[in-house]
Image: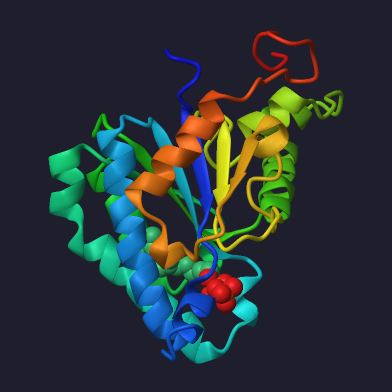
Amino acid sequence: MDTRSPAHVGIIMDGNGRWAQSRGQSRPQGHLEGLKAAKRIVKAASDRGIPYLTLYTFSTENWKRDVEEVSFIMALVRRYLRAELDFYRENGIRIRHAGDPSRLPQDIAEELQRACEDTRDFKGTQVVLALNYGGRDEIVRAANRALAGAPFADGGARFTEALIRSCLDNPDVPDPDLIIRTAGEFRISNFLLWEAAYAEYYISDKFWPDFSDGDLETALDRYAARDRRYGGLRGGKGPAA
Ligand code: FPP
């Protein structure tokens, strides 16, 4: 595989509210345009043959928002999961989930599970929806899964990186190579904390609803020019096993 093309891109889709505010529109209007942008970028990533794309859709901290805004975002997610099966099929897109489903509205958790099952065998881009997702929460849940598993049963096991990794939400998904954040913020905001240890970052000043296919191309071009050293020397190969 061409190592200058990322296997996994994560996106922190920020700036829906500011996009709306800058036009005198409501925050929900911004999220609606944000959904259109998400669809556009999923298609672009699929056309570009990017194997994995993680979209930070709703964090464990986003519950602090007004109940109306949370309900609106959940309604968008519901609509996205229900209406797009033909699109997933046509483009071979597999839907996956990262995050804790237990706090999601039951119908959304069920739709999510159904979308994951219906697309399980599709061989194109795998789109991971980070929904009720927090990086710290994922690590805590992984540690608890590890504790509940066989290696600890005899009392002799220790935590290892490999063990924690095998207990993450999607252990077979490679770590993100590139994380894009929109709206000009230089923050990780609890996104893929474990997985992003050696990710490259690209910050766009654009609000998420304005993020275009061309902006994705620019991010990928910038990524291709980076020298990834994984703590080693120039031209070094890959992260430690
Ligand atoms: C960040 O903008 C955006 C969110 C918290 C919600 C993201 C949701 C969508 C894009 C719609 C659903 C998408 C899918 C893939 C189902 P913000 O509200 O934090 O913006 P602000 O910082 O300008 O207020």
Which of the pair 16/149 is nearer the observer? 16
Instruction: Check the picture and name the quadrant holding the C terminus.
Output: top right
Which of the pair 66/180 is nearer the observer? 180
Residue 178 in the image, given as x and y percentages of width and height: 56, 36
Which image quarter: residue 124? top left
Instruction: Check the picture and name the quadrant holding the N terminus.
Output: top left
Residue at position x 26%, y 41% in the image:
93
Residue 84 in the image, given as x and y percentages of width and height: 20, 57
Compared to residue 109, the image places residue 191 above or below, namely: above
Residue 189 in the image, given as x and y percentages of width and height: 69, 58
> Is any part of residue 108 visible from this angle?
no
Q: Is residue 20 left or right of residue 120?
A: right
Residue at position x 36%, y 53% in the image:
212
Residue at position x 35%, y 72% in the image:
33
Residue 3 in the image, given as x and y percentages of width and height: 50, 16
Residue at position x 66%, y 20% in the image:
227
